[in-house]
Amino acid sequence: MKAILLLGAPGAGKGTVAARLVATTPYRHVSTGDMLREAVKAGTPIGLEARAYMERGDLVPDAVILRMVRERIEREGPAGAYMFDGFPRTRAQADGLDDLLAGFGAKLNGVFVLVVPREVLISRIAGRRVCRTCGAVFHVVNLPTKVDGVCDRCGGVTYQRPDDTEATVANRLEVYERQTRELVDLYRARGILFEVDAAGSPDATRDRIAQVLAAWA
Ligand code: AP5
């Protein structure tokens, strides 16, 4: 089993670059944000618990996240390669992931932190639109749909995430600095951190990461 992480502030482009990497590498995409949004939509017990945290832009409790990720890996099996997006986000989650991987005889192979200036993060989040049906991500300026409000991929309706409001975004960025940023130092100290300039196009970011992954193959 191989495991990599995409780390970075809200709006850095983790989900966008993950979708591109999945198309060209053997890594499967595990986004805790996407899993939580699905749980909220389906009204599962995890979704009911997570909803209020997400609407405020706060982190969902570590135990909930770790259980959700463990169940996903157990369901899909440890074979193959995993690309985690938006997880871990706290030191406790990082330790939990190490334990989880060790249980499968694996360890973290690399961590890619997407580096983007704050003003770019904010404009990316403000313009983000997501398909209600298939989850495809667009941007009103950077990656617009061909028909306004209609998903290019499946024809579903696009919407603005409820946590993409100005007040919630400010909290999410602050939460990243306070609770997640320290993981950059943790993984740098382990020698597995790759800092990726992600201010350019999604393809340029994808290519930078794919180059490192190809060197491991
Ligand atoms: P989550 O969904 O993980 O949100 P996030 O980390 O805040 O990240 P985003 O989804 O906002 O951004 P992204 O980096 O994926 O950017 P994207 O590719 O969409 O988490 C949401 C919430 O769930 C959290 O606040 C928390 O409550 C909870 N949660 C999730 N995981 C958790 C965990 N592990 N522990 C506890 N709680 C957790 O791109 C953004 C926009 O920019 C898009 O419109 C896109 O089209 C555009 N764009 C992307 N790249 C580029 C580019 N290179 N150039 C131009 N535009 C671009």
Image (cartoon, rainbow, N blue to C red):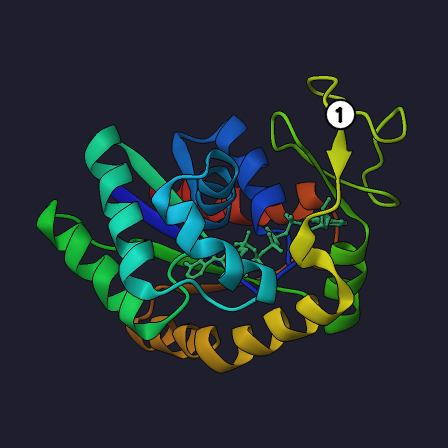
Q: Mark 1 belongs to which amino acid?
A: Cys
- Does residue 78 show up? no
Q: Callout 1: helix, strand or loop?
A: loop
Against 36, residue 74 (above or below) is: above
Q: Position of residue 42 (x, y in %)?
A: 47, 34
Against 137, residue 106 (above or below) is: below
The residue singled out by tag 1 in the image is: 151
Q: Position of residue 98 (x, y in %)?
A: 21, 60
Number of marks in picture: 1
Query: Viewed as shown, does residue 185 lie left or right of 97?
Result: right
Q: Residue at x 51, y 28 (%)?
A: 24
Q: Residue at x 49, y 32 (%)?
A: 22
Looking at the figure, which quarter contains the C terminus?
Answer: top left
Most distant residue in the top direction: 154
Q: Residue at x 76, y 22 (%)?
A: 152
Q: Nearer the viewer, residue 82 or 122?
A: 122
Query: Viewed as shown, does residue 161 lie left or right of 79?
Result: right
Q: Position of residue 199 (x, y in %)?
A: 72, 59
Q: Residues within 10 Å of mark 1 (few under 14, many from 20)?
A: many
Q: Nearer the viewer, residue 86 or 214?
A: 86
Which image quadrant is residue 189 in?
bottom left
Against 35, residue 200 (above or below) is: below
Query: Viewed as shown, does residue 67 lie left or right of 120?
Result: left
Q: Position of residue 129 (x, y in %)?
A: 75, 42
- Does residue 74 show up? yes
Task: Judge: label 1 CB < 8 Å from ligand 1.
Answer: no
Q: Nearer the viewer, residue 214 or 93?
A: 93
Q: Residue at x 16, y 48 (%)?
A: 106
Which image quadrant is residue 115 in?
bottom right
